[in-house]
Image: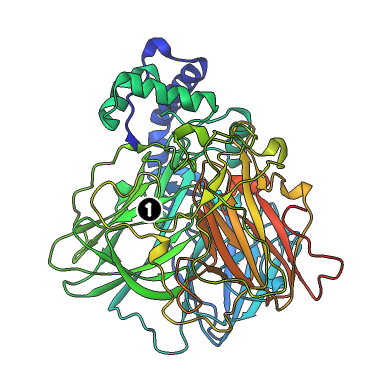
Amino acid sequence: MAEQFRPRWVGAMTRRDFLTTTGSAALGSYLLLQRQAWAAAPDIPPAGRFGELDATAAGGIDLYLDRRDLLIGGKPGRAIAINGSIPGPVIRMTEGKEALIRVHNRLDEATSVHWHGILLPFTMDGVPGISFPGIAAGDIFTYRFPVEQNGTYWYHSHSGLQEQLGHYGQLILEPAELDPVEYDVEYTVVLSDWTFEDPHRVLWKLKTFEGYYNFQRPTLANLDDQMQATGMTLREVIAMRLQWARMRMDPTDIADITGATYTFLMNGQTAHENPTFIARPGQRVRLRIVNASTMTYYDIRIPGLPMTVVQADGQNIQPVETDELRIAVAETYDVVVTLPDEQAYTLFAETMDRSGYARGTLAPRAGMSAAIPAQRRRPMLTMADMGMMMKGGMGGMGGMGGNGHDGHEQMDQPMPQHAGTALPTENLVERISHGPDKHGPASITMAESAHRRLDNSGVGLGEDGWRVLTYGQLRALKRPHSRRAPTREFDLHLTGNMHKFIWGFDGKTWSESDMIRFEYGERLRINMINDTMMNHPIHLHGMWMDLYAGGNLDTNPRKHTVNVQPAELLTVDITADAPGQWAFHCHLLYHMEAGMFRTVAVVRTLDGGPIHADA
């Protein structure tokens, strides 16, 4: 269900609205006064001027990290630049060779570089406090590791909130054998979000004032808009709002941070700067798309051109033609498009909450542009998004931390637990009961049950008549090596309290929890259950997650980051083949910082019992 809102009445302006408005006006006046100063400072370079390096070439490469003033959409911002730019340089590697990368920290604080999705020794993974101490100010750290895979990946800081300031870039790992993807020209597409605010100030606002950046909540002023958007009567709209109010939930909580503070970037450039990708008619263009955002999901389409998805998270898949795809934070997708004529086409990346967009142009010549699509209505969560399907409307809601009962026959079954015997790998249970809530005040339980949403395109999608990519369409091009049925499993609840901006697993933050232990060599299953009303991109370092997408051991895709939708049950199988300590976390940066993080230890034995995520 979608909705679009009008500005609030002036007479209904709150104190926060007044402060925000007057503060914005004051800032605007200041910026106008400073415009001549900016114009007189031609030495400030624009973002988006990144180069390319080969980390497996003789002698390796050097990355230089420093704080630098860069023009972001024409305005100066203080960024953490890598070799002088954001994004950092594209780093290429060749499968079968050794990567050598020297990182020079010219910041006044410690930093790190994590090679996202890359299989390597845990000491090279780049997570301070987990796999190495970090790179102190003024120090040089040398990363050296064998390249054992190919595909499109990315790299970023794992220190504090540095990623928000521009500390990221793309990785391209060339295959040792013939690439199954046929293309004539390729381009890097790095999507990200930028704020001119101090990221620590942003986090403080999120923890202090619930929904601080959500300026499109239902109000009296937009009742008529909601009626027109939904086709409901006034009575029905009011009744629905009261239902959400009784749950103390907001159906517009699609994104914690919005275009109220974010500037949305494609290759470091804003929509009006229009990065251009040149191709001749008839050429097959490979777009290597990375979502390097801290908090922003993008819905990507090229109006008038179908896209053929050929890779997901660096892994080759059976080609899928689609019109639009949603890319979660930290995911990568490779798509191939063919320019049919001499016209320009818009590469449009609209934010999931519809508060903004990034944009580029695919064209035969520089300087061309195409029409920018109108932004769609702001989506709203529905009862289906809250796991209310087949539950008689609101009656199945578990309430605020309760289990809840509606008098209907219980249709769900608890997830069966196994140990020591091979688990089923096809036709897995579609729906499970949530069970008693034992997750404490750090969790607000959404519903009695969670269900698989593999064929669900996500909130705000699927209503336009376009084909939308879903996880249920992803199939591995070839069966991954050493894949087998798992013999142990546990459930992992994704939990959060929006009112206090506390996030965690099974109701606990990282500081409150113990390590999760995997036994070296074991095949393990994790059933992720999202108890929150938000999407969460979950990333495991050092090991692949084989996503149950409705296929089988031959065809289920392999991913390094999986998006778990609200009230979703999502299953991944893991081969614990990487000794050491690894990070396991939500890749929404501010959720990770607020506690949605665990340490995984791959150990020789589980004698004494495995430590599960609820320990």
Residue 353 sits in which quadrant?
A: top left
Residue 453 location (% of width, % of height): 45, 54
Q: Give the SS element for disc 1.
A: loop
Q: Quadrant of the N terminus?
A: top left
- The reply to whether residue 553 is visible in this rendering is yes
Q: Is residue 474 above or below residue 242?
A: below
Query: Seen in the image, is 335 located left or right of residue 22?
Result: left
User: At 28% across and 31% down in the image, what residue appears?
Assistant: 229
Colouring style = rainbow
Q: Can you see residue 41?
A: no
The part of the image, by quadrant, that contains residue 361 is bottom left
Q: Nearer the viewer, residue 301 or 440?
A: 440
- Tell which residue pokes out farthest to the top in this image: 11
Q: Residues within 10 Å of mark 1 (few under 14, many from 20)?
A: many
In this rendered view, identify the residue nearer to me: 75 or 263: 263
Which residue is at the front of the view, 42 or 105? 105
Q: Amino acid at mark 1?
A: Ser
Q: From the top left corner, tell me how far across and down residue 383 is, in percent.
A: 44, 37
Position of residue 367 in the picture relative to residue 482 (left or right): left
**Residue occupying the far right of the picture:** 608
- The answer to whether residue 166 is above or below residue 375 is below
What x and y, as percent, mark residue 133? 76, 62
Q: Residue at x 45, y 38 (%)?
A: 258
Left or right for 297, reference 378: right
- Against 238, residue 452 (above or below) is below
**Residue furthest to the bottom:** 177
**Where on the picture, by quarter, is residue 310?**
bottom left
Q: How many marks?
A: 1
Instruction: Name the residue carrying label 1.
Output: 457
